[in-house]
Amino acid sequence: MKKVTLGKSGQQMPAVVVGCMRLGEKDKASMNHFIHAAVEQGAYYFDHADIYAGGMSEEIFGEAWSDDPSLRREEMFLQSKCGIRKGYYDLSKDYILESVDGILKRLRTEYLDMLLLHRPDALVDPEEVAEAFDILEKSGKVRMFGVSNHKPMQIELLKKYVRQEIMTDQLQFSIPVSNMVANGMEVNMETDGSADRDGSVLDYCRLNDITIQSWSPFQMPAWKGCFLGNEEYADLNKEIDQFAEQYIVSPTTIAAAWILRHPAHMQIVTGTASEERLTEIIEAGKISLSREEWYRLYLAAGHILP
């Protein structure tokens, strides 16, 4: 398994994070088998959220690992997210603390290795977040902290009050959905890709040693589904298929390798309930696309070079 340094922690972690959003439909036995399939390949970093399947993803995961003596808690890295409620976002102190207690109960663990704030809350009081983080850290319930879908200035606002390092920022990123790259390439142009929609978050995270965790790594823009095999991205799939044949891997592996090739040393969040596809994503860590190959895929997705 390819490793990356997690934020400023200095810890080496798997480049592939097992996203658990779609695992809520598994029963205890199949969940247990899935966890073993991941851990045995070095993918022991699991990403949850309190809203996934209404909490069932965490609940079944907790049952599956806690009743299996061969799965040791200290050999897994458990991360979860909070802050999304029905119809609104809530990063208040009380809700963060309440959410974490629920997460710990469902996952059947005494602590989280990492807690992320799931979405920016327009009504966030960063002083309340700081109080919640302090309580969670001092109680031993959470060991590290991060954010998801936050822009640089939103992180800076938190950092004014929060003592703990912000280790990660989860951001949507795939070959077609890569404005993080495009806005840095199409500088001072009037093209669509030149629009800075994220406050240069890619460069900000690199400057501040914040690990980007790429979610929906196979998604098309506007939530239109997976681009792999989709006729709307025929040129991209033609290039991917050619590289897949060249490297003797699946197209999924090539698409994941494109993300892992970036020198920001991102983690990729899988989001699959298929053990076969999980293995294909993990295989991406064994491939290092050349600079020319990386750009060929970028251009085939419809991006431009000025």
Image (cartoon, rainbow, N blue to C red):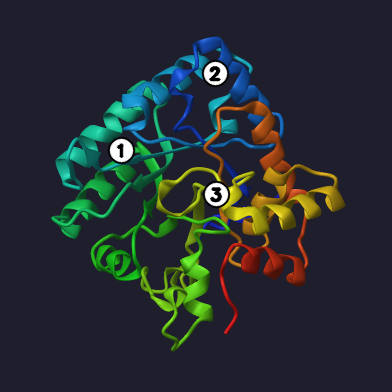
Residue 271 vertical placement versus 64 (above, below): below
**Amino acid at the residue labelled 1:** Ser
Task: Kindly identify the residue that appears in the image at 45 percent across and 18 percent down.
Answer: 25
Inter-mark Cα distance, 2 to 1: 30 Å
Residue 31's disc is: 2
**Amino acid at the residue labelled 2:** Met
Secondary structure beneath disc 2? Answer: helix
Task: Report x, y in % for residue 116.
Answer: 36, 47
Kindly report which numbered mark, 2 or 1, lies closer to the viewer in this rendering.
2
Q: Is 66 placed left or right of 164 in the picture?
A: right
Task: Kindly identify the residue that appears in the image at 84 percent across and 48 percent down.
Answer: 245
Residue count near mark 1 (Cα–Cα under 10 Å), binned few <14, some 14–19, many ≥20: few
Task: Report whether residue 216 is seen.
Answer: yes
Q: Which residue is mark 1?
A: 139
Residue 97 vertical placement versus 156 (above, below): above
Q: Is 64 placed left or right of 201 in the picture?
A: right
Secondary structure beneath disc 1? Answer: helix
Kindly report which numbered mark, 3 or 2, lies closer to the viewer in this rendering.
3
Near-viewer residue (235 or 258): 235
Task: Report x, y in % for residue 28.
Answer: 51, 12
Inter-mark Cα distance, 1 to 3: 35 Å
Near-viewer residue (11 or 275): 275
Q: Is 275 placed left or right of 21 in the picture?
A: right
| Contact flag, marks 3 and 2 (Cβ < 8 Å) | no
Image quadrant where residue 171 sits: bottom left
Task: Report x, y in % for residue 175.
Answer: 58, 58
Near-viewer residue (293 or 265): 293
Query: Which badge, 2 or 1, is on the more N-terminal residue?
Result: 2
Q: Quadrant of the N terminus?
A: top right
**Amino acid at the residue labelled 3:** Pro
Q: Which residue is mark 3?
A: 217
